[in-house]
Amino acid sequence: MIRIISCINDNNQWVVKVDSHSFYIDGKGGQIGDQGYIGEVKFITVLDDNNIIVEKELPAGDYTYTIDISRVKDIGIQHTSQHLFSAIAYNDYGLNTVGFRMTDTYTTVDLDSKDIDEKFIDELEAKINKAIGEGGMVTEKTIPREEANQIETFRKKISDKVIGDVRIIEIKNLDTSACAGYHTEDISKIKIFKIINFEKIKGNYTRFYFLAGDRAIEDYNNKNKIIKELNRTFSCRDNEILLMVEKFNDEKKNIENKFKDLNLKYCEYLSKELILNSFEKDEMKYIVYKDENEVINNLNKVIPSKYIFVGLWENGGLISSSSIDCGLLVKKLSESLNIKGGGKSERANFKGEVSIDEITNLL
């Protein structure tokens, strides 16, 4: 049973206060927390020893509860994978784990090295999967802190924050660590381990993103579906996809270049018509025109700078001329129109939706 003392709506989230619970707290030791049901209402985040986020309001009272066991097993797979990853990185390469964080979709581990490349990734991943294939028992025991201090095989020093008894997780012949999180009973249960990305962080560290167990299998299945779709799209085999993508990009770039050339030629013809239809006010010659951004910018290249060219596109525009201070004109227009912008004397840009008539009436 679990006793709810109160339930409040905090920033559109229902938070229940309980006198106590046995759930795993979200984020504790880098691990995600429990989910399940209190009564018939799902709890989604265990905030601390007394506060839990639930999906909807729960009146005060006593309730039965259930914990999502499939989630617990998945967390155990991911967490044991982290221990295995960190153990092999330490035992074989002398690299220390300086950070660990689990999410509902991936897990990250930070190692104290910046000299990481794809070759290292492949080698490390192969060693981890080899260990998984061979298997190895994962045992846990809880001992007094004084006794734990005498153990010399710890991969990492026990935190000074740990007071009282210490829970020890040991992977046979590979790793001994203090940990309060969920774990699987044998590393063979992990099935498969996959590093999906890595990046340099904080100058001297590398962050690894990985999936393990059913998460890795699901990722493989999803990516296999993508590959099949690419096979159909490009009418090619798996090993030809990259070549076809490169060919596609080259063709796309070629078409874009041809389009730019045609667009510029079009603007050269269009500019002649716009010059014929320009209007004069206070001895200044104006051209106001609205079109796509690419067209406006090309027109700006071919319309003589003696004209005051106001080019408009969706939610923005430009003013260019050598006859006036364009930045000052934008400032003047912004006093009456819903636009913002600025620039130099011969060109200014602005953002905001405005019509040709609105601009013309204010010039």
Image (cartoon, rainbow, N blue to C red):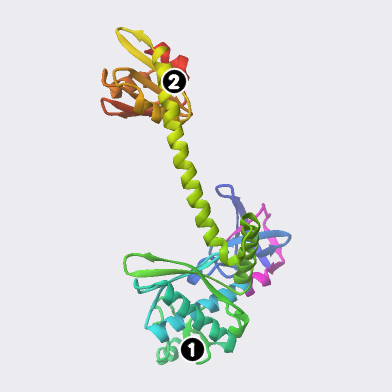
Indicate left or right for 253 with 302 as reference: right
Check residue 208 in the rendering and tell me which mark sits there, or answer none.
Answer: none
* 285 or 184: nearer the viewer: 285
Relative to residue 359, is residue 50 depicted above or below?
below
Residue at the spot x=51%, y=66% of the render? Answer: 27
* Residue 139 colored in magenta in the image: no
Image depth: mark 2 or mark 1 in front: 2
Position of residue 36 measured from the top left corner of the image (x, y, whole percent): 67, 65
Asked if residue 338 can be seen in this view, the reply is no
Position in image of residue 228 (x %, y %):
65, 62
Q: Residues within 10 Å of mark 1 (few under 14, many from 20)?
A: some
The picture quadrant where one finds residue 333 is top left
Q: Which quarter of the figure is the C terminus placed in?
A: top left
Range of the magenta residues? 50-73
Residue 91 as seen in the image, left or right of residue 204: right
Give the quarter of the image for residue 283.
top left
Residue 32, position as x, y percentages in the image: 55, 67
- In the picture, the disc for residue 289 is 2
Q: Of 90 and 233, which appears nearest the observer?
A: 233
Left or right, 291 with respect to 212, comes to left
Please, is residue 105 above or below residue 249 in the view? below
Query: Compared to 199, does 179 lie above or below?
Result: below
Give, as a three-letter code, the residue at label 1: Leu
Among numbered discs 2 and 1, the one appearing first in the sequence: 1
Name the residue nearer the viewer: 162 or 192.
192
Q: Is residue 3 left or right of residue 93?
A: right
Q: Residue at x 49, y 51 (%)?
A: 249
User: Amino acid under label 2?
Assistant: Tyr
**Which residue is denoted by mark 1 in the rendering?**
174
Quarter the N terminus occupies? bottom right
Q: Residue at x 40, y 78 (%)?
A: 159
